[in-house]
Image (cartoon, rainbow, N blue to C red):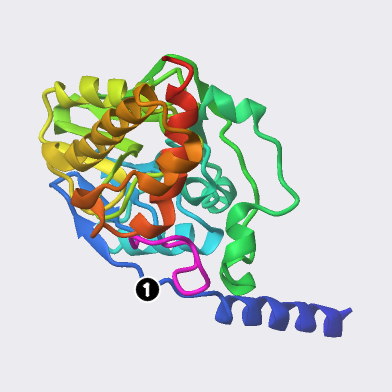
Amino acid sequence: MIIVRILWTLLLAASQILAFEYDLTLSKVNDSTYCFFGKPEAMNTHNNGNMSNSCFVNMGTSYLVIDSGPTYFYAKQAYQTIKKIKDLPISYVINTHTHDDHWLGNSYYKELGISIIGSKEFKNEAKLEMTRMQKNISKEAYAKTKQIFPNIFVDKEKILNLEGTKVYIKSVNKKAHTNSDLFIYIPEYSTIFAGDLVFNERLPSLRDGNIDNWIEVLKSIRFMDVKYIIGGHGDKVSKNSLDMTYKYLSELKEKLTQALENGEDLENAVNNIKMKDFKDFKMYDTLQRQNVETAYRTLEWEL
C-alpha cells in the first residue's frame, strides 16, 4: 500500500511537471480590467488554443472572469498570473458563447467551486466525444480539460450586483456570431465585453452566424456610452474596436446583395467577391470564402 501511494504521488508530480506552459502575457486595459489577448490565428499545436481573449475584472474583493479560455491549464495559469497583481478569489465566470476556445477552461474553475454563467443555449449543447480544441492541439496542453457547461443560464438579461457595482449580462437572443452570444456591460467601468461579436487583427468568422443580425447588434453597441469595447479576438479595446468587424460585415453584405441582384450563383460569388481593404488581416485567406458562402445562403432568402 505504501509503495502504491508513493507511485501515485510520483505520477501526480510528473503530470504537473509535464503540464504545458502557455507563457501568458497579461495586459492592463484600465484600472479594473486585465486581459490575456490571444494570437490572431487558428488553434494549432503551436499556440495550443491561445487564440482568444480571457479577461479578469477587479470588482473590489473578487475577480469576475470573462471567458475561461481553451483548456484547464490555460485557465489555471491565467488565474495564477492575475493573482500576482492582486490575490483575490473569483466571484463568477461568464462564457460569452458556445465556441469551445472560450469556455473549456471552465474545467479548472469548476474545481475551485466557481459558478459559471452562460447563454441558455448551453442547455442544448451535447458533450462531444472529442472537442474541436482537442482535435487540433497537443495532448499535453489539453490534459485535465473536461467539458464543463455553465450552471447559471441567461435568457434575456441577468444583473449581478458585485460590491455595489452592477454588471449587466445581455443576451442577443438571436443568431449573430452564434445563436448563444452574450455581451457584458459594466456602466461604472464604462466597459463592454463583446465576446466574438467583435474581432480585430483577424477576420471574423461567420460559419455559425447570421450577417443581418450581427450587423444589427453591432449598431446597437456602437451607440452605447462606453470607453472600452473588448472583443473575443484582438487586442484593440477602445470604443472603436468594433469598427473593423462592422465595416467588414456591412461591405460583405453590400457586395453579396449586389451579386444576388445580378443573378450570380453561389460558386461565382465565392470565387469573385474579394475584400481588398481586409486582405491584409490575419486569416483572410482561411475565412473569406467561407464567410461569403455562409452569408450568401442567409441573404438569398431575403431577395
Task: Residue at 64%, 61% (x, y): give it.
Answer: 135
- Residue 205 in picture, x, y percent from top left: 41, 44
Could you tell me if residue 162 is visible in this image? no
- The residue carrying mark 1 is 23
Quadrant location, the C terminus: top left
Which of the two residues, 274 or 171, is positioned nearer the viewer here? 274
> Is residue 40 found inside the magenta-colored segment of the image?
yes
Q: Which element carries disc 1, helix, strand or loop?
A: loop
Specify few, some or many for label 1: CA neighbours under 10 Å numbering under 14, 14-19, or 20 or more: few
Quarter of the image where one finds residue 170: top left
Residue that extends furthest to the right in the rendered view of this protein: 1
Quarter of the image where one finds residue 246: top left
Instruction: Give the total of numbered labels.
Output: 1
Horizontally, residue 126 falls left or right of residue 216, namely right
Horizontally, residue 270 falls left or right of residue 190, namely right
Which residues are drawn in magenta?
39-50
Query: Looking at numbered disc 1 in the image, what kind of residue is underneath it?
Result: Asp
